[in-house]
Image: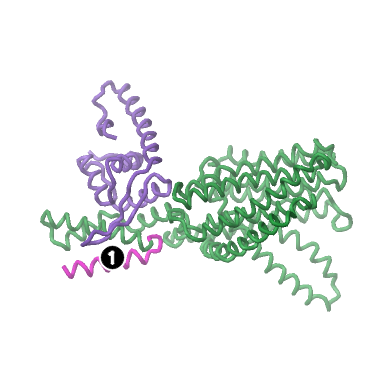
Chain colours: A purple, B green
Amino acid sequence: MQIDKDLVAASATPLVLAILAEGESYGYAILKHVRELSDGEMEWTDGMLYPLLHRLHRLGYVTTEWRAPPEGRRRRYYAITDEGYAALAEHKRQWVTVTRALGDIWGGADLLPFGMGRV
Amino acid sequence: MEELESKIAEWRSFVRHDSTVDGLDVEELEDHLRSQIADLTAVGLATDEAFLVAVKRLGRLDELSRAFAHEHGGRLWRQLVTSDRGEQRETDSRWLEALVFAVAAALTVQVALLAAGFPGKESWWLLRNASLLVLPFLAGYFARQRRLCLRRSLLTAVPFVIAAVVINIYPYVEGGSTELLVAAHLPVVLWLVVAYPYMGGGVRSHERRMDFIRFTGEWFIYYVLIALGGGVLLALTALILEPTGADVERIVEWVLPSGAAGAVIVAAWLVESKQRVVENMAPVLTMLFTPLFAVMLAGAAVVYAVTGLGGAFDRELLGVFDALLVVVLGLVLYGMSARDPSASSSWMDRIQLVAVASALVLDVVVLGAMIARVGDLGFTPNRTAALGLNLVLLVNLAGTAWLSIRFITGHRTFHRLERWQTTYMPAFALWAATVVVILPPLFAFA
């Protein structure tokens, strides 16, 4: 099963914020985490993650920092801010409402496929 | 391994060549590419296969650069460069459309001049209605550009109709100050009405409001340039025609208003289609003038504070301070649209803060003196309008200064500053509309 493109786009922001809420991270690691969470069913075009991260930065939801390990390439890390937590909470509220509505009409609580509890 | 390095280098230069993705972004993408390649080779792929898969996963470059351009508004014009050839034809037809609207505006002005018996007698009617003769065409141009639906097009027309009715049924005292105030404030109201079709009806979106602010600044630069060129053209024409005995002054009197009206639409079209040119100019102008204004304002603030000049200020000079605050606000907005919103604070932000803070100090000194004496001065239409505008600008700049401090000290993002300006936009429209609609009856149309 492939998740619909619009649905992937709509869930991208809360997903990234939720991953960053677990701890700071960088682009590639975030993407890998998304793949794991969705068992590879949410197919992202890798490059598109970066404009999204930059948008979150502009909105003040994340801070960013270039960090160079002793050996190896420097890497850009992202960390969630208080405003980011607030935005995440708002997203969560909206998704819960949507999934509850869908669950009500389809008649089954097991219709929450991507584990809202984790977001 | 060496082969991989050369492939990555090739990829890097290819991406960098596409200018929507700048240096640091490329570095970030490259890090991604390398991590992906490392993972793929770890599960057994050959390096060249891994490279291909990783590049493919990053996505098509044109889509990627469009996404980057979309996010980084300041780089948005580059979409024009990266877009496909197919859009070329569309640009041509837009050119024709702009010309139609520009000519229509110019003709309307001619008809109005004839109707008003210009230039035989001074026509207050014409002065009052000037912006109503031109700006509906700009609104119409944008309504077509944005392909507004019928309902939204009609909604765009409503404020113009209301304005036309209101300012033409009010019984102004001929040449009174309320009439002059209406002539000065109506263009502001109507300009902000144009924002509605410009934003394609989505007036709630802060991003689009910021686009409109940016558009206003860029339009202004283009308009000034066109005016300068037009002035040179008219002067040369006059010199050349003089020996033929033609009444040059009469010709200029007739050509100038129409030219000025048509230029409003042409400038808007230029901003829309040739944004690249002006976007390079705005940062330069800001860099040049922000420090100069900061020095001037800081000097003046110190002098006023030390000598106590403010108290003895002529009451009519409040208008001068209004102009000063408008200029400072203009600098702030130019600076805002010229900078990269995700960059951290720089010395330019500090200099701008100095300019804003000095202007605020100056204004508060003068305003304090005004309010202290308002009892024996009484309210006239002019003074009320000047005082109101002053307060509206003061609140805006005070908010800007506060958020700038928070931004420079790292407590707030730059985005908050943008938000403040875009949220504040309706206040200007409201105040200008108040002066147009409510002030004249309050002062018996004097």
| Residue B266 is at least partly visible in this image | no
What is the x, y in percent for residue A90?
Answer: 39, 34
Residue drawn at (70%, 41%) of the image: B433
Which of the two residues, B61 or B285, is positioned nearer the viewer here?
A: B285
Q: Quadrant of the N terminus of chain B?
A: bottom left
What is the number of callouts on the image? 1
Which of the two residues, B378 or B255, is positioned nearer the viewer here?
A: B378
Range of residues picked out in magenta: B1-21
Mark 1 crowd level (few <14, some 14–19, many ≥20, 10 Å Cα): some
What is the x, y in percent for residue A27?
Answer: 28, 51
Which of the two residues, B129 or B149, is positioned nearer the viewer here?
A: B129
Tell me, yes or no, whether the highlighted magenta stretch contains residue B14. Answer: yes
Which of the two residues, B319 or B55, is positioned nearer the viewer here?
A: B319
| Residue B45 is at least partly visible in this image | yes
Left or right for B66, reference B396: left
- Most common SS among magenta residues: helix
Residue picked out by circle 1: B11
Residue drawn at (48%, 50%) of the image: B407
Dividing the picture into quarters, in which one does residue A37 lie? top left
Which structural element holds mark 1? helix
What is the x, y in percent for residue A55?
Answer: 40, 49
Chain of residue at mark 1 = B
* B291, above or below A6, in the image: below
What is the x, y in percent for residue A76?
Answer: 31, 55
Q: Quadrant of the C terminus of chain B?
A: top right
Tell me, yes or no, whether the highlighted magenta stretch contains residue B111. Answer: no
Name which residue type carries label 1.
Answer: Trp
